[in-house]
Image (spheres, grey):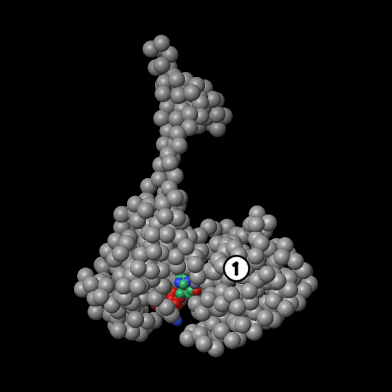
Amino acid sequence: MKTFIKPQLSDWSTLTSRPTKETQDLQKIVLDVFEKIQTEKDQAIIDFTEKFDKVRLVSLEVSTEEIEEAKSLISEELKQAIQLAASNIEKFHALQREDVKIIETTKGVNCWRESRGIENVGIYIPGGTAPLFSTVLMLGIPAKLAGCHNIILCTPPNQEGKIHPAILYTANLIGIEKIYKVGGIQAIGALTFGTETIQKVDKIFGPGNQYVTAAKQVAQNFGVAIDMPAGPSEVLVIADETSVPKYVAADLLSQAEHGIDSQVILLTNNEQILNDTIAKINAQLKVLPRKELANKALENSRGIVLNSIEECITFSNIYAPEHLIIACETVENYIEKIINAGSVFLGNYSCESAGDYASGTNHTLPTNGYAKNYSGVSLDSFIKKITFQKLTTEGIQNIGPAIELMAEAEELFAHKNAVTLRLLDLRSKA
Ligand SMILES: NC(=O)c1ccc[n+]([C@@H]2O[C@H](COP(=O)([O-])OP(=O)(O)OC[C@H]3O[C@@H](n4cnc5c(N)ncnc54)[C@H](O)[C@@H]3O)[C@@H](O)[C@H]2O)c1
Ligand SMILES: N[C@H](CO)Cc1c[nH]c[nH+]1
Ligand SMILES: [Zn+2]
């Protein structure tokens, strides 16, 4: 971890920025893969899976036998843990349902909105470096609650051409039936264009590495919506003298272990806390199975001492982290000052792992500064809202003259006429 003690304000723009990536190259790779998928469909998926995932697939779709086998491979304790997480995630997302509210804007003019689930959705479950079966819950549960008809799950196969049993168990638990062994750019391409086996969808959801994130961005040019750019994980921890360095170190490492691109930042008003946390990171790192990945991510990480916790929050708002942990005993006064963050964890006991797995909030969140303009996945992400209106005879008489005047002023006489004809009829009947 690189450390900075009370850096000058002029250094903040470098310290709050992410390392730049060669997006141009990625776009070219994505476009090449997409082009082949459009023409060669399933065959292209099989060939790219062989190239990028180093496995030749016999079948793209997961079979019922594979699901049954997966169920038998998962321990009862893990099944119960997944069920607890599923129940909390369902409670939190079900609360996001909105009642239909009808407003009479003018007497006789009633307007309202109704929600409809997006019919065909693709959910991407990362699987390159770890089988993120928790992401199945984070995407599948709101998709089901929203009433999406077709939920297509794609996730990369391992070198035996199989999917991790926990992903299959979790998908089956929440009622997802269409599961395909496809990852990376080729999965996003299949969901964007459709193949003989994999159905084209209306919107693609899910986090992933830089290839998946770039492919999702490009997919938008082909008429598919995406949830948001949810790339390599990030956490920013704000700590003061009431923080517990071993917890802070553990939280930083919990995101560093996701991959070499993970971004972890520690901000504090107390140099001793910075030094103690670094010592704890070094001690905890030694026993981590994924220490190589975490160590690489730590090369890009920053530990920064600033003048106050308020200044740390200002810094964090500029950086806009995916996850923000305020690891201080008293946090209430800071909440309203937080403007840009994907998900916030308050106090010494709110570790990010809670939100990653089981507290109920969604872990699919905007990264790379997109927390400034995107929210994380929620029930709303799977819903379209349709507006409705019903005007009575009194309603059209009340607002009709205003519409006629406005239409005439815009020189749109057919618009005006649609009102005039009705008003004339009503006058002749009166
Ligand atoms: N932002 C969020 O909400 C969130 C949530 C969970 C995970 N994540 C992030 O998701 C990521 C998961 O990454 P992952 O790699 O483990 O799994 P992944 O499934 O995203 O990517 C694996 C796929 O990448 C493709 N690939 C690998 N090397 C390639 C190459 N050289 N060229 C083309 N394609 C290639 C392969 O096809 C493989 O199937 C991590 O960075 C993690 O931090 C983010
Ligand atoms: N921290 C990840 C989101 O950035 C989500 C996750 C899944 N499993 C563990 N963590
Ligand atoms: Zn995580």
Q: Which quadrant of the figure has residue 367? A: bottom right
Q: Which quadrant of the figure has residue 317? A: bottom right
Image coords of residue 240 (percent x, y): 69, 70
Q: Is residue 29 above or below residue 406?
A: below
| Residue 90 vs residue 148, the one in the foreground | 90
| Residue 412 vs residue 302, the one in the foreground | 302
Residue that mark 1 sits on: 348
Image coords of residue 31 (percent x, y): 43, 71
| Residue 186 vs residue 251, the one in the foreground | 251
Residue at x-position 52% and y-position 87%: 287
Which quadrant of the figure contains the N terminus? bottom right
**8 with respect to 254 (left or right):** right
**411 with respect to 40 (left or right):** right
Residue at x-position 41% and y-position 42%: 114
Question: Please, what secondary structure does the residue beneath circle 1 have?
Answer: loop
**377 with respect to 146 (left or right):** right
Which quadrant of the figure contains the C terminus? top left
Image coords of residue 238 (percent x, y): 65, 69
Residue at x-position 77% and y-position 74%: 6
Ligand 1 located in image quadrant: bottom left
The disc labelled 1 sits on which kind of residue? Asn
Q: Is residue 59 above or below residue 317?
A: below
Residue at x-position 46% and y-position 27%: 109
Asked if residue 304 shows in the view, the reply is yes
